[in-house]
Image: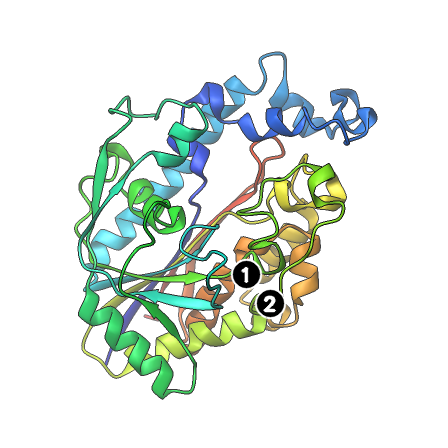
């Protein structure tokens, strides 16, 4: 029978940059002329947000945030190494990377072999040096298993879960950073160069009605006022069911499978009702309480509209993970919720283990 480990973690891109740039998305948002001045005035922000922003634009807070994230990532890597997986299945959003105007599937298995990709493409575009002081043009080899990925797509289709697949990365676009940063951050001390586990990536259309309309998420209010929304993405319940199907696909195997959800939770730049200034922390806290209590029913009742309203688009990756954990009767061994108003998103970490 197959054996499983479940991990949840963040792929927060600005963790790959320096402390001086970690609050860059908030600085960029504060320049939007269509956000009311009162909303942009720190005097009107929550106390915790004002404290982190302080008088240095959150540089000191960035160092504290980085320390917590690194400690939690290290704990996830320790669990991964102790488990010794044969394959690492990662659910990650496609943020206008492979999913573009030509085709936007709900889900796609990336059936790639080893692939050399740019490590810091997003940071370079944002003008931030990388946190490791490595050359800006550094590349990483992502170790893939094309045969295992094809087998998974085949098993999912046979199980009645229609699954798209890809044999080749889109030319001229970044490799999906949700997958790239999973390797980068689980090997943070070595900038992703000492991660040898083969990856089976499943990219998820988390952005749904904003997938093409906002080309990955960042947009000024003037740009979105009359935007033409795309068709909605997969529902949270459908993502949960995908996770269950993946667990079934490996249940009868002799493999050790690590299953990873790669994303932060509510994103400020997706939360229109809060003027893109901070994430929807109450919505995140509700789901975290359910996660910590093993309450899958609360998760299954979340609608796609609620996800969009809270800016929780990328949490669909976590719905996939929780579906798999439910199907495999996994036990939550540890979790942590790391709230932050100034660093765009709240972060969550989790380790699921087989019952003893």
- In what element is the residue under mark 2? helix
Looking at the image, residue 51 sits to the left or right of residue 105; the answer is right
Q: Position of residue 72 (x, y in %)?
A: 39, 42
Q: Position of residue 278 (x, y in %)?
A: 66, 37
- In the drawing, what numbered circle is on residue 339? none
Q: Nearer the viewer, residue 165 or 206?
A: 165
Q: Which residue is mark 2?
A: 299
Instruction: Classify mark 1: residues with Cα within 10 Å, few (<14), some (14-19) or many (20+).
Output: some
Image: 161 above or below 99: below
Image: 114 above or below 324: above
Q: Does residue 68 show up?
A: no
Q: Which residue is mark 1?
A: 291
Specify which label sits upstream in the sequence, 2 or 1: 1
Residue drawn at x 60%, y 27% is: 28
Q: Does residue 137 show up?
A: yes
Where residue 113 sits, quadrant-wise, is: bottom left
Which residue is situated farthest in the front direction here? 102
The quarter of the rendered structure image containing the C terminus is bottom left
Which residue is situated farthest in the top direction here? 55
Looking at the image, residue 174 sits to the left or right of residue 240; the answer is left
- In what element is the residue under mark 1? helix
Q: Position of residue 258 (x, y in %)?
A: 29, 62
Where residue 253 sits, quadrant-wise, is: bottom left
Image: 74 above or below 142: above
């Amino acid at each position: 029978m197959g054996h499983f480990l479940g991990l949840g973690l963040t792929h927060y891109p600005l963790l790959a940059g320096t402390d001086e740039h970690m609050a860059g998305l908030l600085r960029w948002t504060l320049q939007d002329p269509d956000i009311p001045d009162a909303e942009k005035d720190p005097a009107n922000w929550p106390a915790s947000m004002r404290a982190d922003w302080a008088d240095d634009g959150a540089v000191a807070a960035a160092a504290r945030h980085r320390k917590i994230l690194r400690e939690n990532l290290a704990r996830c890597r320790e669990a991964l190494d102790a488990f010794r997986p044969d394959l690492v299945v990662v659910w990650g959003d496609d943020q206008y990377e492979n999913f573009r105007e030509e085709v936007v599937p709900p889900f796609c298995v990336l059936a790639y072999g080893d692939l050399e990709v740019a490590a810091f493409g997003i940071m370079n575009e944002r003008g931030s040096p990388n946190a490791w002081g490595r050359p800006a043009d550094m590349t990483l080899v992502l170790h893939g298993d094309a045969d295992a990925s094809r087998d998974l797509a085949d098993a999912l289709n046979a199980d009645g879960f229609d699954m798209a697949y890809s044999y080749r990365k889109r030319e001229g676009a970044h490799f999906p950073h949700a997958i790239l940063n999973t390797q980068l951050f689980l090997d943070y001390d070595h900038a992703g160069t000492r991660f040898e586990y083969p990856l089976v990536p499943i990219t998820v259309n988390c952005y749904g009605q904003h997938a093409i309309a906002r080309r990955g998420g960042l947009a000024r209010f003037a740009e979105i006022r009359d935007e033409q929304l795309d068709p909605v993405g997969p529902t949270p319940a459908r993502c949960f069911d995908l996770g269950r199907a993946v667990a079934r696909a490996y249940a009868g195997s002799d493999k050790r499978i690590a299953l990873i959800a790669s994303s932060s939770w509510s994103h400020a730049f997706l939360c229109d009702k809060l003027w893109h200034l901070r994430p929807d922390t109450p919505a995140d806290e509700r789901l975290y309480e359910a996660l910590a209590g093993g309450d899958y029913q609360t998760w299954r009742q979340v609608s796609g509209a609620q996800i969009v309203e809270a800016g929780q688009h990328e949490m669909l990756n976590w719905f996939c993970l929780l579906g798999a954990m439910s199907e495999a009767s996994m036990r939550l061994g540890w979790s942590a919720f790391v709230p932050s108003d100034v660093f765009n998103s709240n972060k969550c970490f989790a380790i699921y283990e087989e019952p003893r």
